Every structure is written in structure tokens, then in C-alpha cells.
Image: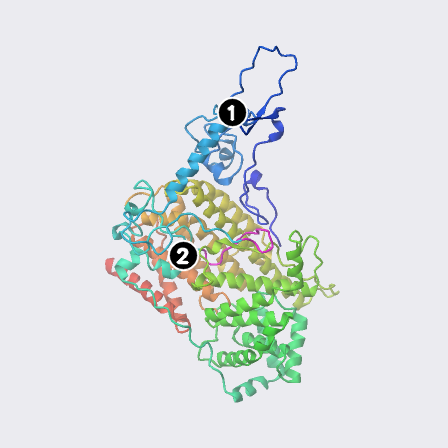
Amino acid sequence: MAPPHHPHAQTGHVRLDGPAITAPSGPDSSSAPSVSPTVEAGVIFDRPEPSRDAAAGSRKRPAARGTAFYPRQRNLRACQVCRSRKTKCDSKRPSCSYCVSVGAVCVQSSFDLSSFDPASLKILDRLDDLERLLRVSPPGPGLLAEPSPVAPSLLPQPLPASRTGSVGGYVVGQLPQYQHVDPQTGDEDCGLSSGSQHPHGSADVPLLSLLPQRIDNILQWPVFRNHLHHHPSPVRLPPDAIPSPAASSLAAVVDMESHRIYRLLDNFFLYVHCKNPILDEPSARRMVMRAFLDGIDWSPASCLALIVCALGSIASPFGPSPTRLDTQLFADSHVFFNAAQKRIGVLLIRSDIIGAQCLFLSGVYMMMVFQPIYGWRFFSQALAACQHFPFLTRAQQNPSLSPGGGMQMGRQDTQEQAVYWSAWKSERELRSELSLPDFDILHSGSTLYPPFFPAPPVPPPESPDGPGSETQRSRASWLFYLAEISLRRLTSRLCSEVLTLRQRYPSDATFLDVLADMTREYEAQAREWSDSLPAELSIHTPIDEDGICRSVLRGRFINLFEMIYWPFVMAALSHAQGRHAHQHLLKKGLDTHMLQVRANEPGFYHRHHGSFFMIRSCTRSALVLVAAARTGCAAMPPAWDEAVAKVAGMLAYWEDEDRSLSGWKATLERELAARRDEQ
């Protein structure tokens, strides 16, 4: 379900199937007058052909410098909005046509550059480039008391090249941190950061971060560090994920009635496989049943059967999960999983798809039991196992091909694409949260997306009685799968545009003004995506009616708006002494954080693959609301403290399984207690 293509220059929409920002076109050389080259002192000049019947003693006036080097044409300087979008600007005054059409504030140069010759315009452009470079240069040692551990440059790091030669976009799971001030310094009277430390001068609005940050980074904001004396947890090795069960317990679990196998299979396909449809359900069911009926051995099929049963043991319908640490179902799932891991080593030296499927599903299990380090290892191994799949080899050899345009896709290709995409996005999303020394993503939004969508399976011929339950589940799973991928691409595209805007406008105040003009366009693109969803996934329904798939999409949709409004919230928090220039966007940002908590509340106590990320998104929103209240923000949403209390309760529920949560819960509880004391 690839999003529709919208020409960027006409509608203002960012394309989801290609780069959002295109390079401006150069001058049209076809309009130049006929010239012939001559050589003077080793330099080639373009001179008009002399007339054959010219008088011998007469000489023509030399051509002007502008016409000698460049074709004659009217040169206009684009306004700030059109320059940020890298599109043509008609430079009409007082507002150009594009700014009038979108209602943006058109900021143009106060000088009329149309009378300048092209060479002078080139010189002015070079001077602008030099000025930008000087602005973004790191401050000297006299400006900051200590060197910042984070690179102070405002320019994003160079983007990695696409393996297939096509830049499909940027991936954002948890969006990247983007700092240009020392997180260890700051003025506690200013809330988050000090304007006096900003290299652009006191007239700017200092930004602590450009995009949403990890929780540990947020807890280092001065508003928390100065008042709560929070210290980050020391780095510790992850514990052994799961203790090995006794041999007798494995025999007891494996020797079960067929009706229990059916129940575990139903749980798996209803509540786990629906979010990552990497298996063909009919053939997978037959494989699992055959493995248990014939006896569990050391084959890949037995390994897959055990992992499916492990996931089926702890999966449950959307809502509070009954599988806590001390339940028998949780213990049984450990038994199945450990038995599968004793067989998974053989799959590392095989090239069939079952190995990649087992590795990916093992990562899903690790995420469901809050072991993200081990989950990332499995996702990485699954992605490595996919590298020589035939469909990927064909796509690499001919990047112009796509599943919908020339590549013949069979059932095997569909499964290969599905496990590849699932492993790819899971590994990238999780990597951005873990701070891995050799795998860190400085800007996780600059990770390249594969240039194609996975191809859904071809539905079987419909019977006279209508589609079967397995066919209906497959269709629903793939609708969600493609919708989530398209939303990730849209989020990543807008993330890359924000980074590009920041690169063009190192001044915080100017950047915020231009971004405010672009926000309306970003909001329109987000709503266009939501309007394109099929009825069974529509997020225009009440939150209380959400199932797991709709809840996940709604949460990611809110994350997109959080990213759009984040700079304005940060500007307001760090400029607490004065009125922020974009109050309406600040209010939208804080309302989005409230909505984040409200939308995810039905799934607070539900165990699934994305629980790890949902907990962090809601905790981040709660901390932002606390920071806004502490700095005296006037745009606080009603009942924000009740939302923070609900997040603290969620952290208390899961803190026995995720050791990071107890410290976050303590921070929120201290803030709520301090607020009660102040009232």
C-alpha cells in the first residue's frame, strides 16, 4: 500500500517514494546567444562572431563582464521559504506566489538583486556560504568553560550511501538527539539552556535539542539535573536473559495434547504474527503440527515450532496481559524458548529462509520479555541471514526494479521480503535506543530506507463461502504492515527535511520562523496519510475501540506530530523568561504529549513487541510536561499532572522486568510530590 505520489513543486507534499528535497535546476543554457570561443592569455572567453564586412579601423566596444561570462537572463533571489524547499520562487512582492498560496510569511531580501550581473550574484552566494560556515563553526575555548562531549557543530553528519544506489528515505524509530550545547552546562534560571552560551548571540532562542531525545538525555536537562540531582545509571553488562530449565520440564511441556498446540498457534497468529507477517500461515501451521506429532528433533522446523509456541504462550489479546513473571504461562514460554535456542546455532550456517525467520522471532520474544540487548543481537543476525536472498540480489543488481514494477514475486519472495523488512526496521529502531559503541546512530533519522515496499502475497482464489479466516488475517496483517512502513517513511522524510532546514538556517530564531511556515505543510501530509488508511485501520475512531494494530499506528502517528512540534516546545522551555514567538505551535506540542499518554493508556499493561518503545514514548512525554510546568509555561494542558501520574503507575507495573524504569518512576513521583507541596 505505497502512498500516492504527489509532485512536490506543485502541491507542497513530500513524496514518499523518493527524496523530499530536490536540487534546484541550473540556468537554461539553451537560451544563450550564439557565441564562439576565443583564447586570450590562456583563458577561454565566449565572444560574438565578428562581422565580415566591418571597417578595418573600427573596433567594437568589449562585451560587459556579465554577458561575457554568462548568458543574459533575469536573476532573482528566492525568499527564505522557497530557498528552504529548494524550489523556484517568482520573487513577487510583498509575497511570492507560493507563500500566498500556503499562507506563509514571505521573507525576502531587502535589496533588489535583479539588476546585478550573474558574476556578482555568484560572488554574493559565495559570501553567504562563507557567512554560514562562520556561524556554524565550533566556538573557541573562551566561549565555553568546558569542551562539550557532543560535537557542537549544527551541521548533520554525512549521510551513508545507499547500498542499492537509491536513497529511499530516512528511518526514524526513536528520533535522534540533536544537541549543540554542552549538556553538562546551563543556567538553572533559564530552564533548559542558557542564551548567553549560544554562539549566535543573545538575540537567538537557544535550542537544547532539535528532535526528540532518549530518556537518559532528557534527565540531563538542567531543569531535572539541578533540582533532582539525577545521575545516569552506570553502564552494566546485561544479565543472563533466561535461566536454562531442567530437562524434565522440557519433556513435560513438549508432550502436550494437540488442542493445546492449536491454542498456542492461534495465539501466535492472532496476537504476534499480525504485526510482522513473515510466515505463510497455512504452511507454518502444518510445519508446527508435524514437528510435534513426529517428535521434536534438531531440525530447523523443530526450532521454528518451539519459538512459535514460546511466543504463543505469552501472547494475549489487547489489554492487560495475564503473563506476569510468576505465572505458569511465562515459565512455559521460557522452556519453549530455551529449547529453541539449543537448535538455533545450526541455522547460522544455513542459507534457507527458516533460519532468518527463527532469528527474527527470537528477537521478538526477547523484546516481549524486556531484553532489548539480546533482541538487537537476534535482529542483527536475522538481517545478516537475509543478505543473500534472491529478491535482494536482483534488487541490488537492478535498483530500478521494484515489487510493483518488473520483479516477478512468488510466495517465497514475499516471505523473504517480509522477514528482511521486519528485521531491518526492528534492528534500526532498537539500535537508536541502545547507545552501542560500534553501532551508534548519531542521527537515527539519517539511516537509509530500502527503496521498495515488500510485496504482499497473492490471495488464493475465493471460495463460494467467502474468504477463509486465514486469508482474512493475512490481508489485515499486510494492510497494517504496509501502513506502518509508509508512516515510517513519511516520518523519516520530514525528519530529514527538518535536519536540512537546520543546516540552511543555523540561527535558531530564523530556523524556527522558517519551520513554523513549513509546519502547515507537514501537518497536511500527516493527515493525508491518516485519511488514506482502510476502514479497519482508521485512526479517526475513538481510542477505546483500538485493537493492537490500530493502537500501534495511532502511537506512531502521534510520534510524528511530536517530532514536528518538538523544536517549538524546546524553544519555549529554554526561553522561559520571555514570551515565545510561536505560542500556538507550543500549545500543539504540549497537547500532543498529553495525547501520547491518552492514546497509549489502553495498552499500558499489554505485553507485545513494541511495549519497550511505547513505555519510552510515554515517559518522554511525561518528562516534557513536567519540565514545561516547572519552567512556568502558560500553555499547560488541563489535568497534565494526572497524565504524569498514570505514566508513573505504568512504570511501576513493568519495573520488575525493565530495570531502567524504577529511576524514571522515582523522578516522576518526586515531581508530582513537589507539585502537591507547592499547591
Residue 639 appears in the picture as rendered: no
- The x and y percentages for residue 76 are 50, 29
Is residue 622 one of those drawn in magenta? Answer: no
- The x and y percentages for residue 211 are 42, 52
Q: Amino acid at mark 1?
A: Gly
- The x and y percentages for residue 442 are 44, 56
Q: Amino acid at mark 2?
A: Gln
Q: Nearer the viewer, residue 375 or 305?
A: 375
Q: Is residue 404 above or below residue 515?
A: below
* Label 1: element kind: helix
Quadrant where the N terminus sits is: bottom right
Quadrant where the C terminus sits is: bottom left
- Is 240 on the left or on the right of 309, as rendered? left
Indicate the colouring scheme: rainbow
The residue pinned by badge 2 equals 213
The residue pinned by badge 1 equals 66
- Is 559 on the left or on the right of 38, as rendered? left
